[in-house]
């Protein structure tokens, strides 16, 4: 059962990388930027994007605290936290869960 769940998490990590970054690429190709004076007004352009932005960042902060406290991940926990904000929560969270399933099965 854990092997199948781990496979599902790895598939979700792939989807969580590919789908959001497709839209990120569209945004950047249309002239978007990560510069704060461009990014933040775009992220908070209307109530819908504001809600989504706040939801994802709050979830990313909570996830980061969890990962920071996870001593079983070793030094990789800091890479996971950086990837959470640099690549995306939808990618890192299922990847982390797949790793923890593997680590739990091994230990």
Image (cartoon, rainbow, N blue to C red):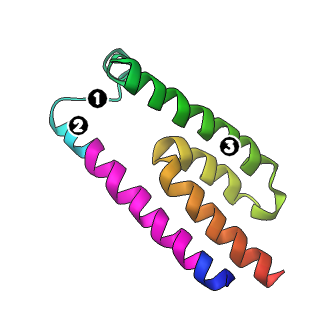
The C terminus lies in quadrant = bottom right
In this rendering, the answer to whether 33 lies above or below 86 is above
Q: CA distance from mark 2 to mark 3?
A: 26 Å
Q: Which residues are magenta?
A: 6-24
Q: CA distance from mark 2 to mark 1?
A: 6 Å
Hey, which quadrant is residue 6 in on the image?
bottom right
Q: Position of residue 33 (x, y in %)?
A: 28, 29
Residue at coordinates 60% horizontally, 40% vertically from top-left?
A: 60
Q: Are marks 3 and 1 in contact (CB under 8 Å)?
A: no
The N terminus lies in quadrant = bottom right
Q: Is residue 13 magenta?
A: yes
In this view of the protein, which residue sits in the foreground, 80 or 42?
42
Residue at coordinates 57% horizontally, 64% vertically from top-left?
A: 95
In this rendering, the answer to whether 78 lies above or below 8 is above
Which residue corresponds to mark 3? 64
In this rendering, the answer to whether 82 lies above or below 17 is above
Q: Secondary structure at mark 2?
A: helix
Q: Within 10 Å of the Cα at label 2, are there few (<14), some (14-19), or many (20+) other Cα atoms?
A: few
Residue 85's label in the rendered image is none
Which residue corresponds to mark 2? 28
Q: Earlier in the sequence, mark 2 or mark 3?
A: 2
Residue 33's label in the rendered image is 1
């Amino acid at each position: 059962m854990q092997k199948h769940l781990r496979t599902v998490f790895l598939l979700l990590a792939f989807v969580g990388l590919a789908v959001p970054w497709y839209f990120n690429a569209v945004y950047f190709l249309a002239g978007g930027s990560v510069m704060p004076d461009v990014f933040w007004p775009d992220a908070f352009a209307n109530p819908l994007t504001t809600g989504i932005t706040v939801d994802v960042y709050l979830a990313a902060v909570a996830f980061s605290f969890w990962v920071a406290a996870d001593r079983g991940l070793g030094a990789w926990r800091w890479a996971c936290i950086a990837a959470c904000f640099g690549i995306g929560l939808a990618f890192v969270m299922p990847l982390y869960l797949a790793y923890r399933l593997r680590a739990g099965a091994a230990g």
